[in-house]
Amino acid sequence: MNRILRALAVVLLFEMGALLLYLPWSAFWDQNYFFNHIPSLRLFVLHPSVRGMVSGLGVLDICVAFGMFGSRPTPARVPPDSNS
């Protein structure tokens, strides 16, 4: 993968993870547009277990970003010529 694309993917994953980690516990999560149109959704989305699952996805995204940052792609191995 190109180094620039790899760096952009790491930054994107880290930012998405940070947002998913923070947003469920902020006031922005409580003031949702869809709560006015679907009142039963409020009970589900505001439950602490659902918030925890969304935050867990954020932690997973951050871990994947750090994993991509630390690993280096290995070149493809070419098998030796067997004509000997």
Image (cartoon, rainbow, N blue to C red):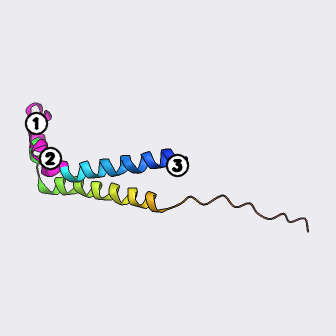
Residue 56, image x, y percentages = 26, 58
| Numbered badge on residue 10 | none
Outermost residue, top side: 37
Q: Nearer the viewer, residue 53 or 23?
A: 23
Q: Which residue: 29% across, 55% down?
A: 57
Query: What's the magenta region?
Result: 23-41
Q: Which residue bears the numbered disc 2?
A: 45
Residue 50 among those drawn in magenta: no
User: Looking at the rendering, which quadrant does residue 34 occupy?
Assistant: top left
Q: Residue at x 28, y 54 (%)?
A: 58
Q: Is residue 62 left or right of residue 7?
A: left
Q: Which residue is mark 1?
A: 35
Mark 3 Cα shell of 10 Å, populated few (<14), some (14-19), many (≥20) = few
Query: Residue at horizontal 23%, vertical 55%?
Result: 55
Helix, strand or loop at label 2? It is helix
Sooner in the amino-acid sequence: mark 3 or mark 2: 3
Q: Are marks 2 and 1 in contact (CB under 8 Å)?
A: yes
* Crowding at mark 2 (Cα within 10 Å: few <14, some 14-19, many 20+): some
Q: Nearer the viewer, residue 1 or 42?
A: 1
Q: Amino acid at mark 1?
A: Phe
Residue 37 location, x and y as percent? 11, 30
Q: Nearer the viewer, mark 3 or mark 1?
A: 3
Q: Quadrant of residue 83?
A: bottom right
Give the label on residue 3, or none: 3
Tell me the quadrant of the picture where the C terminus can be found: bottom right
Q: Secondary structure at mark 1?
A: helix
Residue appearing at x 19%, y 51% in the figure = 22
